Amino acid sequence: MTKIALEDIRLKDFTLENLSRLQELRRLSFARKPEICIERARYITRYLRDKDDPTDSPEVRQAKKVNYFLQRKRSVFHDHNLLAGSTTSKALGAPLFPEFFALTLWPELDTVSTRAKNPQKLTPDEARELNLEIFPFWMENNVLELTRKRIGNGKSAECLKLFESLVFFIAAKAGCISHAVPAYEVMLEIGLSGLIGMAARRETVALAHASEEGNRQADFYRAVQISLQGIVQYAEHLAEEAATLADVADDPEVRQEFLDMAKVCQQVPAGPTTNFREAVNAIWICQVGIHAENINMAMSPGRLDKLLYPYYKRDMEAGRLDISRAMELIGCLWLKIADNVTMVPEASEEMFGGAGTVPAITLGGVDADGEDAVNDLTYIMLRVTELLRIRDPNVNARYDYEKNSKEYCRRVSEVILNTKAVPAFFNDRANISALTGQGESLEHARDYAVIGCVELASSGRDYPASSSIMLNLAAPLEMALFQGKRPITGEEQIGPATPDPASLKSFEEFWEVFKTQLDWLIEKAIDLNEQMGAVHQQMMPSPLLSAFFEGPMDKGKDLIQGGSLYNSSGATHIAFADVVDSLNAIEQTVFIDKKYRFAELLQMVKADFAGAEGEKMRLYLKNRAPKYGTEHPLARKNARNIVGHLFNLYQSHTNYRGGPYRPAYWTMTNHAGLGGITGALPNGRKSGEFFASGITPVSGAAPELTACLNAVAELGGECVPGCWALNIKYSPEADVEKMTERFAQTIEAYFRAGGQQVQFNIMTYEMLLDAKKHPEKYPELMVRVSGYSAYFKDLNELMKDELITRTMYDLANGRAVAYPPEKGGK
Amino acid sequence: MKKALIGDIGRYAVHDGPGIRTIVFFKGCPLRCPWCHNPEFIADRPESAFFPDRCIGCGECRDLCPVAAVEVDKIAGINRSRCTGCGLCAGSCPTKALELVGRRYDVEELTNILLRDRLFYQTSGGGVTLSGGEPTAQLAFCGELLQRLHQQGIHTAMETNGFFAWDEFKTTCLPYLDLILFDVKIADRDRHRVVTGIGNEVILANLQKLLAVRADDVIARIPLIPGFTADNENITRLAALLKELMVRRCSLLPYHPYGLAKVEKIGGTQNNTLPQKPMNDRVLHEWQCFFTDFDIVEP
């Protein structure tokens, strides 16, 4: 157990007023407008066009391409951040990855800078370069086109078509794999030179085998060396540039800052880390390096409190560091992590608008021995998070209710109440057992960190491609209702032609029909994911990222080839609560109460509950049918059955890297986007309305807080290895101390019941309505979407409405407050 | 065991005993206090509550009512003299504009519901509070329920008006109660009878007996109701009385017009002498000053 040396774990004497550097950097972070950065696209295109050696293995080719870029990447210092290195050449950059969806920008080159919603600036010269030089090269060479070519007219063509209709599932590999938590311990200890040396020795040994396998391994080790060498060179350039800037600086203080940065970059990440500042900067430069190879989506630094603590402690004990400086460095890292955004074409605004890049940081929890891992840095990072209140990084707090202190739980609760949104809370007991259920050793499971939104991975041991499939559960439900067709796709026969539900004798028969459609769709999604996985193996291996994992060095295999210790693929599900409630409504009103005939229900659903009779039925279904999020036994049964069925189905599939599929329940903004294009459902949801987010019950369906938390919690553990996002909204109270107390007690009870994750918005209906009406009054309002944070003003209208109408509970009586807000209120 | 008529079950209550609690509202009360917070739990039979703002006038209730007690003119209306409280209308209402208040539970079913939140009790030092209506009006059931909860290690409390048969209460309930919140309203016997319908002799005698055996576990509570209890004379007399009885813990409940809006939902009429606004904090403070020589008043 780590002893807490801080006198005040709340660090309330440290404010932005006396951390003026952070205050200024924070101000800049809000003032900056995103700019598209074409640097990476330019150099990898040039490499592949002019220098590529087609006889290179995919790994070596990737390494050379990344190395070529890193050697040419500009060293820029945009502000007074103490850390050297930046993801892009712009102060707030959206890097382009032409391997993926960058080409969707092509038709928007002239408009992206000036569009009304979330514009991203692009200079005319760079637009021309994209148009004439870069994009034409990638027309046939991006992941999606290569997948199309690979599939041809084969049986998987149908899967691709389903994906491209966008209303069934998203095959996320067309846009990224990324989603990983590297392990930096070894890098900090021996430096990248040490890692390069290791790879070189392995290469020699592999070549000595003089076998095909040995040669393949040697190629991989060579790729590791080449790509890491790229980071080393980038760091050298940073050191040179910092030294140059020091030379020309007039202000002695600024001059010294640049000299210090130059010194840091001369030492790390190439050499072993000797102090806290070097450790922080080494991690940051490696993160930049990883982004040269992998798209900026949920590349998560992981358990930084645990990782950095030894360096912090040594410097503190030696008197080389004080709390204020440590907070400044951590704050600088937080702001650096937020230096990039994703390029979002206008067409994708509906689905992903307002999302950050969701690099997750994980605090607290237990160590490999199962003991309390909370340390002084945990509290420093919490305080920095509380002060900065920025969208990225996505900060998450692990909590083991037996091992972590109550003070820790209360402090995290207090930060959530003060920021109104972060961090998210993760239950160690449930999540560790979810991972050991996946065959991970107890020690490895205990070292889990959060990836992106909510997904779990043992740090640097688990390559979970956690965002491989995002599946709309309402699609198979609609197909079950309409014999394999969906209202939105008309008369086209999509899924198997299952029987007309009106002919069914029992709910169990309908459940079988639903499973037939569900299983069919999942098979298609998995099929396409496998095809895309194979394309990634050829085109996008990750030798650089592999260097920061356990497994690849021993196996001589890239992560994409199954080099990691654990190799799962993740599938997340949208519309869970709406589908459970629809099943409940069918079972109760059609089969148990016989209030409606199935044919009658189908007719009304198809007609979107039009007319007075339709509306009457809709209200009855909405208000009177059993709901997920209550204690109703039927609702609990149906929720359990879906979760259980999905678990068994996914686990029975093995992916191209040799690991299982893991189901999850988080939705980003897809529950709004996919809801917008899905027809009416039997739970009384009208066509085009958003779905509930993540694993959260439908808004208004769960009137009692404890019943809601119990209903969700009992689904937790082994059957949800990909984790979930539960959104809870509380109205703020005047007495913060009392509220903190109850808040923490409530979380502990939810965790003891098995809940895996929960995140909060501490705000009222009225405030969010006002923020929608007067965005200028709330420029910094940060909200939790489903697994990540966003600025409310950046979200699209549907997503704003979803956030506004989410059930708000009053923590003074545990009851849902009715929406819309009643005048006078209760 | 007979079933009990329960008006509602309120989970995550934080004002009626320590920690996070579930409150069981028993339906039926022998007193008729005009300011009652929960007028829907006074009558000892099920009743339909009507929420006019939710009604869409669809007529489903009218069509189902076996005694023609519902009329619909744009929105529904209930003829209370005909209504038998069968609940058919509430069960069919698509918008929950009609809800049946009062359901019979057997002790096992109720215990299971109360145990669903035991983790919340555990992490907050909370438990279960029996309230109402008046729980002691269904005394035997209370005893059975409290015994079961106690066996499960659940902290138990009861809110009572004090009007119960002492001997039975002492043997069936008291051994399984950790805390008793005992209302003391009006000191004067006759005025108590005029205002609440029942004299205070039994109530005060019960309080005295209770204090004799469990003084530390009793909190005497005085509702501060303008025009009924919150006047100089009554409060002075109550203060003296509590002192004489050697009450160790006491709290003041400031007036809140909760009950006013609810009374119409079950077909009653508001007492128009009661204020529409909650008691001002400063007024509450003034009353608290009456008790300054007591160091027993709890916030």
Image (cartoon, rainbow, N blue to C red):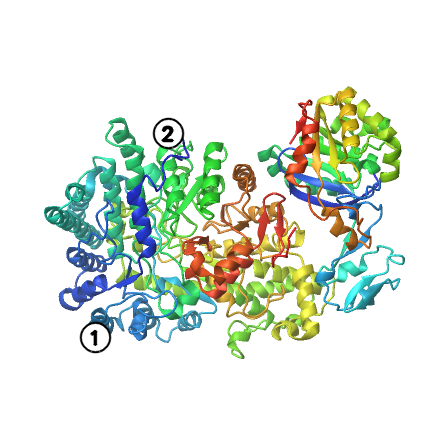
Discs 1 and 2 lie in a common subunit:
yes
Say which element carries label 1: helix
Residue type highlighted by circle 1: Leu
Give the residue at x 45% y 39%. A412
Asked if residue A245 lies left or right of residue A692, the reply is: left
Q: Residues within 10 Å of mark 2 (few under 14, many from 20)?
A: some
Residue A185's spot in the image, x, y percent?
28, 39
- Looking at the image, which is closer to me, A811 or B63? A811
Q: Chain of mark 1?
A: A
Q: Which residue is mark 2?
A: A6
Q: Is residue B94 above or below residue B219?
A: below
Res. A397 image quadrant: top left
The quadrant of the image that shows the N terminus of chain B is: top right
Asked if residue A547 shows in the view, the reply is: no
Q: Chain of mark 2?
A: A
- State the CA–CA distance, disc 1 to disc 2: 58 Å
Mark toward the start of the polypeptide (1 vs 2): 2
For discs 1 and 2, the disc positioned in front in the rendered view: 2
Q: Residues within 10 Å of mark 1 (few under 14, many from 20)?
A: few
Give the residue at x 49% y 61%. A772
- The extreme bottom residue here reads A491
Q: Is residue A446 above or below residue B84?
A: above
Residue type highlighted by circle 2: Leu
Residue A45's spot in the image, x, y percent?
20, 66
Asked if residue A770 shows in the view, the reply is: yes
Q: Which residue is mark 1?
A: A132
